[in-house]
Amino acid sequence: MIRSHLTELMLRHKLRPTELARLAHVNRSTVAALTRARATRVDLTALERICTVLGCGLGDLLEIVPEDPAQGGQAKSTGAF
């Protein structure tokens, strides 16, 4: 499972989703999907643009989290998609 840290990064930079989308030249729905852990497919160019605006690497934005077998393969925490 992949967890997005976009919400934390936006808070750190004091950016709202609409502002980030405008600055990164990506669709607002892409930013919304990443912040709500609903993204299933994200364009690599969009991820690159978001990382460029936030001054971070892809590893700072996304994290691979092992699935918890006790919960039927679901990760325990929120923020994962």
Image: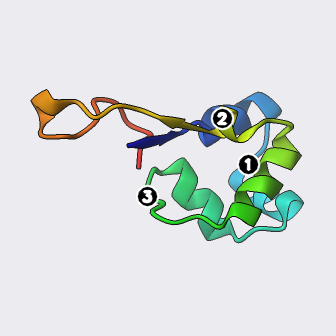
> Which residue is denoted by mark 2 in the rendering?
59
Residue placed under numbered mark 3 in the picture: 38
The picture places residue 19, in percent across and down from the top left corner, at 81, 56
Neighbour class for label 1 at 10 Å: few (<14), some, many (≥20)? Answer: few
Question: Residue 59: image x %, image y %?
Answer: 66, 35
Residue at 55% across, 49% down: 35
* Left or right: 1 in relation to 45: left
Q: Which image quadrant: the N terminus?
A: top left
- Where is 42 relative to 17, above or below? below
Between disc 3 and disc 2, whose residue precedes?
3
- Disc 2 is placed on an element classified as helix
- For residue 16, the mark is 1
Looking at the image, which is closer to me, 42 or 37? 42
Report which quarter residue 14 is drawn in.
top right
Residue 3 placement (x, y as % from top left)? 48, 39
Q: Amino acid at mark 1?
A: Arg
Image point (27%, 29%), residue name: 76
Instruction: Name which residue type carries label 3.
Output: Arg
The residue that appears at 64% across and 58% down in the rendered structure is 31
C-alpha distance separating marks 1 and 2: 21 Å
Tell me which label, 1 or 2, sits earlier in the chain: 1
Q: Dot 1 lies on which element?
A: loop
Q: CA distance from mark 3 to mark 2?
A: 19 Å
Q: Nearer the viewer, mark 3 or mark 2?
A: 2
* Mark 2: few/some/many CA within 10 Å (<14, 14-19, 20+): few
Q: Which of label 1 and label 2 is nearer to you? A: 2
